[in-house]
Image (cartoon, grey):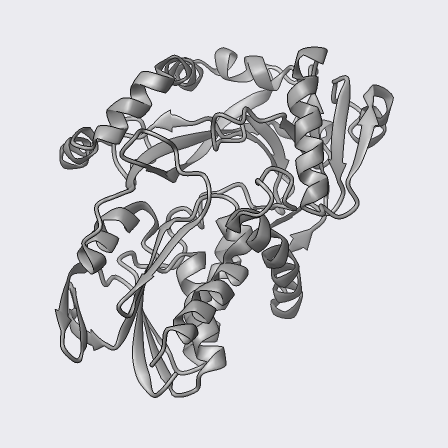
Amino acid sequence: MTEQTVGVIGGGIVGLAVARELSRRHESVRVLVFEKEDRLGAHQTGHNSGVVHAGIYYPPGGLKAELCKRGRSMLREYCSERSVPYVECGKLVIAVDESELGRFDALEVNARRNGVPGLRRVSGSGITEIEPHADGVAALHSPETAITDYAAVAAALGEDVGRAGGRVLLSTAVTGLRRRHDGIDVVTTGGVHRVDRLVVCAGLRSDRVSRWADGADGPRIVPFRGEYMRLAPSVRELVRGMIYPVPDPRYPFLGVHFTRRVSGEVEVGPNAVLGLAREGYRRRDVSPGQLRDMASWPGFWRMARAHWRTGVREVVGSLSVRAYMRSASRYVPAVGPADVRRAGSGIRAQAVDRDGSLVDDFRINHADGVTTVRNAPSPAATSGLAIAEHVVDRMESESP
């Protein structure tokens, strides 16, 4: 790239990784990161379960499978370099009864095609050797699935950008974009900034900001609130690492699971309840304008018609701890409703196409000097450094 200014909208892990990659490769490039909050990683990056995925779930050949594998190894090395916690506590994906074995077998084939390191299939007795209090008929053990602190990773990436001469502008919301013959004006609450090229990594607002950039309407973001429970200290040691269900391939959500955090706490969740605001972490958080925007999208109603029964079950689990723990207790029977407390929540930016389908793979578009990351759900945090490589490679290939 010749000497130029590149703007990156979004101070989550993907936006920061792209900014760092640009700064590392091109000393002549001036990078500006625009983040509307007063801190980095304020939303999806700072509200996820901290898991570093190994690639079990993702269809071979897709961007998720490719970038998760590359991103995991890059992230492990980066955490070592920057002294960020990284613990390979391992994961069990458990089939609790024989009715799940068809999906379980397909998942194993998928995981092996993706080259998940150290993967092995274990029986009921093998399950209890790894997780003594877990129950099931078969499981996939991924010993290199890890946990980290993604907020700390985001902070380290931001420091890297600053040291390389870039600027991270906090409390600077982007309110509009204007194309010029000699670049793009990024209109913010802190003034107007002229950039030569632009990368949109706006997470929960990626559809709206991307539409300003390239005019394309869709997919739209539908927010889903994921609520967590936390095990009481007295039962925390009943779970050593991570315990997951066999996912339903109809949905991009993994289902309620047990995850040990780098702090030593163990969380249960998240569920997936339709959010009433894009940054609505509490049930009472409602944005009428955002609801109108969601209701105006034909894909929302098509999605709702197809999945309303699942939606009702998720709402019941949200309102009742007993209902929430009913499925989780199938995997660790010793843990019940009395052993958990409500913890935090996160919001997943779920992209939905006009036909109502839930977009599963990463969706990244490039046109006329603008790159838009329109869908970057899990494992985007695991894959962030590899997504950045992918984005910058494409930007370089399209440079004049």
Q: Inspect this view and state whether residue 400 appears.
A: yes
Residue 127 is left or right of residue 69, and the answer is: right
Residue 368 percent coordinates (x, y): 26, 68
Say which residue appears at 61% left-offset and 66% top-offset.
78
Residue 83 percent coordinates (x, y): 63, 65
Q: Where does the C terminus fall, quadrant-wise?
A: bottom left
- Mark count: 0
Residue 304 is left or right of residue 294, and the answer is: right
The quadrant where residue 222 appears: top left
Q: Where does the N terminus fall, quadrant-wise?
A: bottom left
Say which residue appears at 36% left-offset and 78% top-offset.
399
Say which residue appears at 43% left-offset and 75% top-offset.
22
Residue 317 percent coordinates (x, y): 44, 16
Residue 302 percent coordinates (x, y): 28, 23
Position of residue 169 relative to residue 230, above or below, is: below
Residue 194 is left or right of residue 376, and the answer is: left
The quadrant where residue 243 appears: top right
Position of residue 63 relative to residue 235, above or below, is: below
Query: Which is nearer the eye, 136 or 300?
Result: 300
The quadrant where residue 132 appears: top right
